[in-house]
Image (cartoon, rainbow, N blue to C red):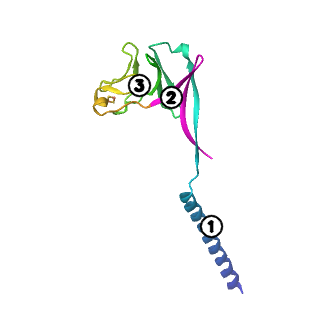
Amino acid sequence: MRTDRRQFLLSSAVATGLASAGALLASIVGRYLYPRAGVRRTRQLYVAPASEVPPGTGRPFTLPDGGTALIANTDGGYAALSNLCPHLGCKVHWEETERHFVCPCHDGIFDADGAAVSGPPADEGQQLTRYQVVQVGDHLFLELDEVVEV
Ligand code: FES
């Protein structure tokens, strides 16, 4: 009788373990076969009053992921570009007098649209990551696209 009870408890524990493992496996397979759909949305981040970025000037802006975008008031309007050089990752800055972006590490130069025009980045056909900048009245916003799980 005692052995039967022990046998029953052991069998119950094994059955429970197998059921749990099966449910976990089914969950993993289900997520693989039917991944969750994400919703794309555009997030607007306030940068600064436009009057604080007069023509020819630029200013850094910290992104939510800790990176930095450079907001520049170029001859063609506002531009927002990553400050990370695509060559080897040095920090790029806006050159107000020349109105272009400069990477000091290997003299990489990028135009106001972020396309490399000289130095190793130009040789490799690279460009700075570009962000969308929007002006609403006297306010500048950065628009970031992101996917949000539902
Ligand atoms: S890291 Fe920028 S030019 Fe080399």
Please report whichever mark, 2 or 1, sits nearer to the chain's N-terminal start: 1
Mark sitting on residue 20: 1
Q: Identify the residue position indicated by label 2 in the image.
A: 132
105 lies left or right of 70: left
Residue 91, given in percent of the width and then of the height, sits at 39, 27
Q: Identify the residue position indicated by label 3 in the image.
A: 113
Residue at the (53%, 58%) spot, across then down: 32
Amino acid at circle 2: Gln
Question: Is label 3 within 8 A of ligand 1 (CB to nearest ligand atom)?
Answer: no
Q: Examine the structure image and report whether residue 149 is included in the region drawn in magenta.
A: yes
Q: CA distance from mark 2 to mark 1?
A: 48 Å
> Which residue, as the protein is rendered here, is positioned at the far bottom?
1
Q: Examine the structure image and report whether residue 111 is included in the region drawn in magenta.
A: no
Residue 18, given in percent of the width and then of the height, sits at 60, 71
- Residue 6 sits above or below residue 59 on the image: below
Amino acid at circle 1: Ser
Part of the protein shown in magenta: 130-150
